[in-house]
Every structure is written in C-alpha cells, then in structure tokens.
Amino acid sequence: MFEVEEWVGGLWHRVVTGYADDRYAGAAVTLTQMRKEVGVLYRALGGERAVRIEAAAERPVTLPRTLWQRVAGSHRRLALAYLDEEVLALPEAIALFPKAELNREIYRMLAAVAAQSLPGVSGWAQNACLRYAALRAAYPAMRARYDAMVSAYIPLRATLESLPPTLQDKESRLRAAMLSPETALIQDADIDGLQPPPFWLYSSLRASDMSVRRDVASDAQMQRPPAAPEEKVEKKAKGEYVQDHDGDKGLLVFRLENLFSWSEYLKLDRTADDSTDEDAARIAEDLDHLSLSTQEFGGGQRIKLNLDLPSASEDDTPLGPGLHLPEWDYRSRRLLPDHCLLQPMLDHRAPPCAPPSRLRRVVREVRARFEMMRPMRVWRRNQADGEEIEMERWNEFCADRIAGGAVEQPMFKSFNGRLRDLDCLLLADLSMSTDAYVDNDRRVIDVIGDALLLFSEALDAVGDRFALYGFSSCKRQHVRFHVIKNFAEPYTDVVRGRIVGLRPGFYTRIGAAIRQSTIILRDQKASRRLLLILTDGKPNDLDLYEGRYGLEDTRQAVLEARRAGLIPFCITVDKEAGEYLPFLFGDKGYVLVNNIERLPRELPQLYATLMEGK
C-alpha cells in the first residue's frame, strides 16, 4: 500500500510541476556553454579582467503566480544576474524563449551591459536602465538587438488584465522602462511583486558586512576529508559571516584547581560540536541563506591550529631588518608605499650535499644534454678587420708585393664567442599548499626541490648565470624571501643542500616577492633577463590578499617587471590556472605542467624552449 501511495505521489508531483513549468527545456542554454563567449564579450567591451564569471545564486522573490505554480510551490526563487567588484554572476541556465538563440542573446546582453561603467546611481532598477541607455548610445548596433529581445520578451509576461489592480500600473511603468531605458524613471519599489526582467543586473548577493574575517587558513590550504561524490552540493546560496558564540554566556562553575597557567592556556571553543553532520549537504540544499562561522571546525577527523611563526632557533636566519615594498590597491588605483615588509632569509643549517642518489642518473643525462648546448668560441677567418692578423695571409701579401703583384685581400681573423647574454632568476612558491602529498612518499615541496636541482644542474652545465629564491608569507608585515642562490654565488654542494632542505612555509603573497625579484634582476648587466615563477596556486594570505585584491596586485607586479625590461614567465601545476593566469601573465606568459611528477624533467626543457624562442 505504501509503494502505491508513493507512486501516486510521484506521478502527481510530475504532473503538477509539468503544468507549472513555463520554461522551454528543449531550447535551454547553460552558462557552461556560454562562459567563453560571455568572458570575451565582457572584457572586449571594457569589463574588468579580474572579475570572475560565476553562476548566480537563487534568491527569494515575490511575483504573480498561476494556480498550478501555487499548487506546485514553484517560482518562489529565481537566479538573478548581478555584478560587484569581484564577480559577474549570471543564471546557471536560461530557458525563457522557445528559441535557443534568443536565450543566448540574454547572456550576451548581460555581458555587454555589465561592461558599461557608470557613476554612482542609487537603486539597482535605475542603474539597469542607465546601463542599457549607455550601451545603446555607445554601440548603435546593439540597439536593434536589444529592441528585438525586448519585443520577444514582453508577450511572455503576464497580461495587464490578469494582474491585480495594484500591480497593473507598476507593470505598465516597467514595460515602458524596458522599451525606452533612456527616459526611464523607475525605482526599486516599482518592480516589487512583478516578474524581474532576466536581462537586468540586480543588487549583489555577496555579504556587505566583511568586518568579520577568518583568522585561519583558506579552505584551499586546509586538508579536509574528501566528501562522497553524491554529497557534493552544486547549489549556490546567499551567505554571510557571523560572530560565533563566545562560550562564556552559560552557567559558570568556578574550580580553582582548573585554572591554567599562561604556558598551558590554549584558546579553543569547546562549546562547538565537532562531530560530523551526515545531513549537512541535504540541509544546505534546502537553505536560502547560509551563515558562515569564523571558526574552522568541521568534524572530528582533523584539527588544525594556526600557531605563531617558528622560533628563531628553528627558523632560517634573517638577513638584515627587512625591506619595505609597495603594494597595489586596485580599489584606490594606486601603489601603497611601504605597505609590505619583506624579510630575506638564509638557511645556514642545511648541510652541503651532492644530488640525491635517486636523481644522479637524471642529473648526468641533463648535464650531458645541456653541455651540448654550451656556446662554442671559434675564430672566423678571412675577415676585412678583426682582433688579429692571419700570418699566412700576411706572408702571401708580402710575397706578392715584392713580386709586384700585390692585391688587397681579407687577412684578419675575428673571435666569435656566440655567448648568450642572459641572466635568469627562478622564484619558487614555498607556501604551505606545497605540503600536500603527491603520492605515498613525496610531497609537492619534494617535487619542487627535485625540479630546482635539475634546473640548476642544467644551467650550470650550459654556463648561464642564474639565481634561486623562494617565498611565502604570513600577512603583509612578514613576507619571507628565502635566498637559495644569488647571482654572485657559485653553484656548489652548499646550494644543493639548501635546495634539499626546503620546507613549506605559510601563504602566497606573490606580488611582494615579484617586486623584490625585479629589483635584483634589474641590477644585472645582461641584455636579456628572465624571471621564472614556479607556483602551485592562486595568490592568497590571511588578510585582504584574497580574490581580486591579490590577483590585481600580482598583475601589477608583473607589469612593473615588464616595464623594467624583464621577461616574466610562470610555470604552474594548478589545474585551474587557466581561469586567472592569462589575466596575470597573458595568454603566452605561462605554461601548465599537467603532471606534477614530470616537473623535474620538464623544467629544464621549458627553459631551453624559452631561450630558443626568445
């Protein structure tokens, strides 16, 4: 009996939702299909390159619904497009029109109108109209396309007669605003209770109160237990950070013997439940608004404490008091002077060593291959001028002169060095994300160390001048800049020992590290100076250096390096690098090594390819 009721309920649900659904599923177009075209159009028309394109979250709306829609309980939430400083959020799918081309046109219009820059306008409804007015004025060809889209859209809206009398006047003003955005005088309240136009930009869903910040590592750096595939939550929801319960508002039982000394005290919130919630994914799908805790707890499988920097006895040796460097703030469009403190550091404890036994065969192969590329210095003979006279030609000339038949001929020889006038600085990311394991035995930092060893052996064999540095950070006042080998130091077992002794650091404030590398490389005398950056992820840090802020500062540092005459090039193992590295280095300024285990062998070959192509 229960199975019959369940079958009848499922059938009723499908019938009701089918009648209530006013979308054209057969003509649906998804953001995944349009992402590339939308990105190109948005940026080609002047949109900010650092703005990410993401799927918009659904938000609660109040709008007229048909009887079937009320019975089905649908049309209570819609995914509306919005634009803020970091994200252009577009609907995950559009199936408004029976023709797929018209649905694609909505994506194109949203990208084009988002690229229009406007002065501050109060109200998102007026802002949407002014954006379309600016688009139609700047690009007359868009006027006809916009008019065709609006003409096809208005008949799909509810008729004026079917609306309550209180909404009919609002609907008339909204239609007039869509047909003539240049003369529209519409306010946010004028659209309350009506179907929102799908090609407008609305207020952002991102939390406006960012005073509550996390004091721990970002999710990308935390080692979380992998979730089961069926529990992966694809739905997006509105979220905000909230203050956590302090844990001291309940009954206080005072026991003198439980007092901790200062050395024993550790601030942990024991009021928080650290057990795993197996229904978390299901509950998250049903919530419209997610409140995010500032704590980092998520189950008994792990505990991670962000303790202070290592003690002086366990840390590398600082070289001097530190260097003050600027940082780019894209919001004010200026460099903040002396904003970061970069601390050069040297590992004096690493013992000198030869290449590890597992790499010795590969080292011999790399050195043999690159020694064949070492420039050869030869004499060019029979030159009209040069450093020395060829004695044989001179004797022949003298003999001919005595005989009365002397003829002028080339009799000099010139020394051709064919040396590459090149200096290379390699900057390696040593953030704590490199502490992740590649396999059962090796971590990312171990693979990076092997790559630096083979790279150094290759350049030492070919005779090019090079320097090696590493970096990590813990907020802007402690950017760690590890000196592995400078340009004046020869490549010896001491340098090999520092490479073998590399350890993961903290976070990735890459802009300051690039600026210091630019200063070092700019002082070299070679006509070509190559800055190689080896990294495994996005710029990030504990403070504001996340998202667009870090990307903009890194891009500005790369531009400064190019203006100084350097050639910056990035080598990454991050599978998502295609989403942000073109913005930082350009389409031809980076390369992705898909298999990190191949990095040690590919890094020297990448260097050789760069030198042949420059």
Image (cartoon, rainbow, N blue to C red):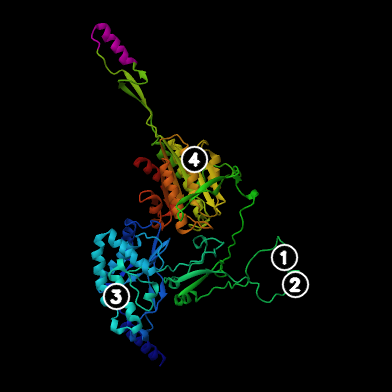
Question: Quadrant where the N terminus lies?
Answer: bottom left
- The kind of secondary structure element at disc 3 is helix
Residue assigned mark 1: 260
Magenta-drawn segment:
391-406
Query: At label 1, which amino acid type do we have?
Result: Phe
- Check disc 2: other Cα within 10 Å, few if <14, some if 14-19, many if 20+: few
Q: Could you tell me how far apart the alpha carbons at marks 1 and 2 are, in whole angstroms?
A: 11 Å
Mark positioned earlier in the residue sequence (3 or 2): 3
Q: Foreground: 348 or 446?
A: 348
- The kind of secondary structure element at disc 1 is loop
- Check disc 1: other Cα within 10 Å, few if <14, some if 14-19, many if 20+: few
Q: Could you tell me how far apart the alpha carbons at marks 3 and 4 are, in whole angstroms?
A: 59 Å
Residue assigned mark 3: 25
Q: Could you tell me how far apart the alpha carbons at marks 1 and 4 are, in whole angstroms?
A: 49 Å
- Check disc 3: other Cα within 10 Å, few if <14, some if 14-19, many if 20+: some
Residue 158 visible in image: yes
Residue 255: image tag: 2
